[in-house]
Every structure is written in structure tokens, then in C-alpha cells.
Image (tube, rainbow, N blue to C red):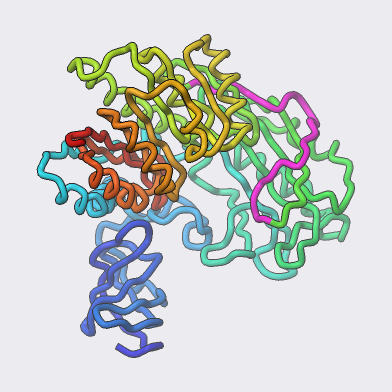
Amino acid sequence: MKKKEIIEGIVKRVDFPNKGIVETAEGKVVVKGVLPDQKVSVQIQKVRKDRAEGRLVEVLEEPTDAIESPCIHFGKCGGCSYLTMPYVKELGLKEQQVRALLKPAMDRQSERVNWEGIKTSPVKFAYRNKMEFTFGDEVMGGPLCLGMHKKGSFYDIVTVSGCRIVDDDYRAILSATLDYFSPMHANGEISFYHRMKQTGYLRHLLVRKAVRTGDILVDLITTTQEQHDLTGFKDALLSLTLDGRITGILHTQNDSLADAVIDEGTEILYGQDFFYEHLLGLKFRITPFSFFQTNSLSAEVLYQTVRDYIKSLYDQKKISKDGVIYDLYSGTGTISQLLAPVANKVIGVEIVEEAVEAAKENAKLNHLDNCEFIAGDVLKVLDDIQDKPDMIILDPPRDGINPKALSKIIDYGVQYMIYVSCKPTSLARDLEILQENGYVMSRAVAVDQFPWTNHVETVVLLTKTTA
């Protein structure tokens, strides 16, 4: 194989998160953005001893079991990856990816691991309870767009008025927002924020909806570079006929250079800036910027799995209800509150202060007086906690656990830990350190939180076997 050469081959497998292994007459090529069993043409970009890396040029043939994408934006929008794959095949792919990443850990221990496969999301479409849409254009100088980043682009935006991972209310709110601002943009009366130039006004539209109650929050995020009366925008949204109910319309200012929704001051244009969501019998107060799992119904599956693992230990009399549980990287304290009934005390540690305040409010809302939430970096906070844990729950961000923090966690020597991971490559790395220090995997399962995307959650029960 030579650089820039175009060759054809079949995608034999796709490794997490998005690395296709294409077999060709000349050897194996790693290519992103392909699906198993596709016949593709690839342009070689790098050549190494055992393999090459390439760029997808064209899908020549789809697999025989391919389905028609139910989303009109598939292929242009960078959001979903697997919409032409039967869902059962997607589940198999994700389970295979997680098992492949965990296999070295399984092979390192003599103890048997109870691998429990993959748990499906209860809903396959319209599952998201939060979306952040971006203002921009699809082509330079083109009409105003509002939606997701174009596949492979940092700047171009695709209007996703037919997106299938949100329900009709999201699509109606997106379309109404675009209909309101588009004439103003066309007439030069309002601008969208250009990331390169760092100028403009309209940045994002954040929409949240409670699955259980149907309550909706809409937040328009802009810079302070222009001043506009948003009364007409508010009225346009309130005139919509929706399945749910708009409980709040907000305007957030954000002059940060980062391409993220950052709250630098929020004004309530209508209603209130929160709603309540219900999860496994508990009530949670959600604000525009609260961290909350974006698939509420699948989050119940994930958290029930954690609860079931603990209940199993309790039923086998391996743990007692009078212990202390640490919930590290606790977010808004969802897991902490779900575990409160089976512990004497639960201590949650989270670095985001707003999330900690929300966790405290939610614990009061649910009349839980045995939950304590501490704001700070796990690495630093652990030294100051007086109550020592009998069990530890780990639910770190995508990059996993800081090695120094992991060392402190291991030093507690608890008999059981449960690791909830949103990135199996980080989990695999941390497992190696945990196993070196006497822990083994006892149970493990994947959970599909995000159908049609390449993301997957994993829950692992760890047991200490040696000092």
C-alpha cells in the first residue's frame, strides 16, 4: 500500500469507539465512520508495518441486512452512527466492543467473571431529555441554520428539524425558533456567533423535557454583543401546540470563547428556571445546566443495575445496611439517593459546585437525611473525610480516574466497589491498576444508554481478594 492510493475492501469489525478494520487484498486498513460488513473504498493516509490508516472515500455496497435510515439527516449530521444498522446488530456490536476491551482484564485473573451481556434501552427513538442545538450556517454566507454540527466539520451546521432521537416537541421548538430568527438574519438585523471570528449574537438553543411530567425548559444562549427584544421569540414559543408544557423560557448570556453552553447570567423570560423529573421513585429538580443522564428511561436501567448488584451482596449477607457508602464523582447525587435506603450514610463527592448544591436540594426533596455531599476534587477531598467507607461507587467522567486519586481509593481496602463507566477504554485502563492491587471483576454488564450512537455504558462489580 502507498500513501494516497485508493483501495477497496470489506469492513470486518468496528472497534470502540469508531475504528473500522477494513480487510483488503493489500492488508488491513483502519478507517473511521464505517459499519460492519460494508464494502468501501478508502484512500490511504498513513502506512505502518502491520497496518495502514485511511480515509473513507465511498461506501460501495451496504450490508445485506442494512435498513433504510429513519432520519433524513443521517450522513450529514454528525450525531448518530448506526441508523442503517438493525438495532439488534447494534447491540451485538456494542457488547462485542466492550467485551474486547475488558478481555485483557478477564484474562489477568483466575476468578470467573459473570458477564451479563448488554441491557437494551427501553426506548429506541425520541429518548433524549436534553438537546443543545447550535446556530450557524451550512455553507458560508448561506441561510441561518439551527441544529447539529455537520459530519466531519467544526463550523458547518445542519438544521435537524427531522431528528429522531428527540420527540415532536423538540422539533417544533427548533422550527419555531428558526422561523422567528431567519427573516431577521436574512435582513441583517441579527447575527449568529462565528467561532473563528468570535463575533455574533445567537449561539445555542437548549431544550430540556421531563419524560415523566412533560414539562419543558427552553433556553436561548447568546453573546452580549447585540441587544434584542426577545418578547416576540417568547410569544412564538408559547403559541405552539405541544404534547408537553413549556414551564420556562430563559435567556442565558455567554461570551466565553469555548464552543460550549456556559451560564454567565440567565434571565427568565417566562415561567420558571426548573422542573421536576422522576426516576425510580425519587424526585429531582432539574435546571437548564443540571447534570442529568440524557436518556431518563435507560438511566433507570443503569441505576437499577447498580442497586441490584448491591442488593445481591446484601441478600448474600456480604454487606450490611449499617455501612458507609462513598459515591465518588456523584454529579447531582442520583446514585447516592438511590442507595440511601441500603446504607447508614452515603457520602457523595463532586467537583462541580452547582451539581453538589442540586444534590443537596434533591436529597431534601426526597426526605433523605443520611446523604452528605461535598464539593471538591476527589483527589483532595478524600483526605478530609472522617467517615471511612465500607463500599465505594465510582462514576467518573469519560477520561476515567486520576491515577493518584485511584491510589487513594484503593488504599481504603473496601471489600466491594462498583465502577460505572461511560467510556470502556478508560475503564479498561483503570481496571489494570485495580487488579494489580488485589481487586478482581466479579460481574459486568454493558448498558445501551444512547441508541444509534457509538456510546455505551458499562457497570462492573469489583471484589477484593488479596491484600
| Location of residue 326 (image quadrant) | top left
* Image position of 266 (left or right of 207): right
**Image point 50% across, 12% down: which residue?**
368
Q: Is residue 229 above or below residue 399?
A: above
Query: Quick check: 276 above or below 466?
Result: above
Q: Is residue 134 visible?
A: yes
Residue that appears at 80% across and 53% down:
201
Magenta-highlighted residues = 258-278
Q: Residue at x 71, y 67 (%)?
A: 196
Q: Does the stretch in magenta take in 259?
A: yes
Asked where in the image residue 458 lies, by quadrant, the reply is top left
Question: Could you say which is closer to the camera, residue 383 or residue 136?
Answer: 383
Q: Position of residue 128 (x, y in %)?
A: 50, 38
User: In front: 168, or 116?
Assistant: 116
Q: Quadrant of the N terminus?
A: bottom left
Residue 92 seen anywhere in this rendered image of the structure: no
Residue 380 is situated, as x and y percent measured from the top left of the image, at: 51, 38
- Where 369 falls versus 21 (above or below)? above
**Quadrant in which the C terminus appears:** top left
Residue 271 falls inside the magenta stretch: yes
Tell which of 60 and 29 is nearer to you. Answer: 29
The picture quadrant where one finds residue 110 is: top left
**Residue placed at 27% from the left, 50% from the top?**
432
| Position above or below: 300 against 90 | above
Residue 107 in the image: state x and y as whole percent: 14, 51
